[in-house]
Amino acid sequence: MGELKLMKGNEAIAEAAIRAGVDAYFGYPITPQSEVIEYLTAAKPEERTGMVVLQAESEVASINMIYGAAGTGKKVMTSSSSPGISLMMEGFSYLAGAELPCVVLNVVRGGPGLGTIQPSQADYFQATKGGGHGDYHTIVLAPASVQEMADFIPLSFALAFKYRTPVLILSDGLIGQMMEKVELFDAIPRWTEEEIETNAPWATTGKKPNRDRNVITSLNLDPSCQEKHNEKLQAKYREICANEVRYEEIECDEADYLIVAYGSSARIAQKTIKLGKEKGIRIGLLRPITLYPFPVEQVKKYTDQVKGIISLEMSAGQMVEDVKLAVEGKVRVEHYGRMGGIIHSPAEVLEVLENKFIGG
């Protein structure tokens, strides 16, 4: 068993970054994720592993620092919250176009605009549908616990380098601020320069006599070449969709009703299942762990079993569109969500399910 500690979600992800052999973190403080850079600064990772921690002058600067460092094959990451992530969207598109691996954490707060510092899940569209310009996707992981905040760091870097793509961890202010017991994994050494050349042969590590120059750019003014590059990216996204879907099923086998929820909403739904069981209502939970790729086939398989599906979100209704696409009209899908930083209660969710599907 690894080291056990009581930590906030933001602290756990920061400690995991140090232990995962991350080379550099470039970020900017914004509520409710400021503890990430605060923890990294206090933990003195440069003395522990040689990891660089730098507060950039803005979110725009930090994402461009990520671009430059990622181009050298280093493991690099940043974190922010909703308005800050919006400022990074041009950089996201550049990273995707240049096929550069990195990890970005979004601890979502309520919007639109500056909104509130309270938790929300209203950045789902931005995260899963691209967010920046052009035809691209990022892999999106949605942790539902402080433990997963830590565990998803090494997983995210593995996926980022496997597919040469940015990976986004989509958390929220509730998970970022809550404290839970975390089992921390043993430290993973940072890659040596030789390991970078082996694991990232595309990186700009210096011209070698036995290979052509490595050129990293997202600019290509030849339309036919740019189309071929886009076709290559789309083939990569199809491969990701075929191989990297992750999800969790709870009490689904005999369920008459299904809740689809991720992150904080999924935690609430688990209590709703227990409350429903006390009233003889059989409810299952399907929790997408990857929001992109979305678990389409896993949702679809319940269309002949359940009488109704609720997409439970802390938003006006975003993931519900993917749920409806998955079921292809074969079962009724309803959305329920709270906004502005208000968190739904388990009893409230059960009442909505009863009203929409049983008493409705």
Image (tube, rainbow, N blue to C red):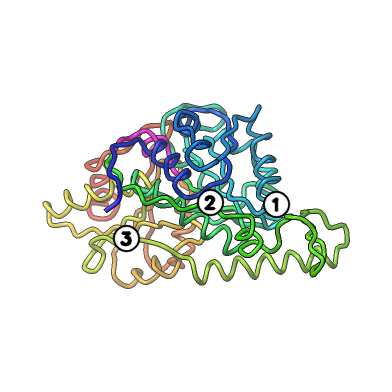
Disc 2 from disc 3: Cα separation? 48 Å
Mark 1 surroundings: few (<14), some (14-19) or many (≥20) residues within 10 A:
many
Query: Is residue 172 rendered magenta in the image?
Result: yes
Pick whichever, 245 or 64, lies toward us. Answer: 64
Q: Position of residue 138 (x, y in %)?
A: 58, 55
Residue 34 belongs to the span the image colors magenta = no
Horizontal relation, residue 220 to residue 82: left or right: right
> Disc 3 marks which residue?
308
Q: Residue 266: x, y in percent? A: 33, 49
| Amino acid tagged 2 | Arg
Tell me which residue sits at (39%, 65%) in the image.
299
Q: Is residue 338 above or below residue 220?
A: above
| Kind of element beneath mark 2 | loop
Which disc is residue 234 wearing? none
Question: Which amino acid, by three-letter code, is at mark 1?
Answer: Gly
Asked if residue 335 can be seen in this view, the reply is no
Q: What amino acid is labelled 3 in the image? A: Gly
**Mark 2 neighbour class, 10 Å CA radius: few under 14, some 14 to 19, many 20 or more:** some
Residue of label 2: 190
Residue at (39% x, 40% y) in the render:
12
Q: In the picture provided, is 57 more to the left or to the right than 328?
A: right
**Earlier-in-chain disc, 3 versus 1:** 1
Task: Tell me if residue 235 can be seen.
Answer: yes
Question: Magenta region: which residues?
Answer: 171-179
Relative placement, left or right, of 227 versus 99 is right
Question: Residue 55 occupies which quadrant of the picture?
Answer: top right
Element type at marker 3?
A: strand
For marks 1 and 2, the one nearer the N-term is 1
Marks 1 and 2 in Cβ contact (< 8 Å): no
Q: Name the residue carrying label 1.
A: 71
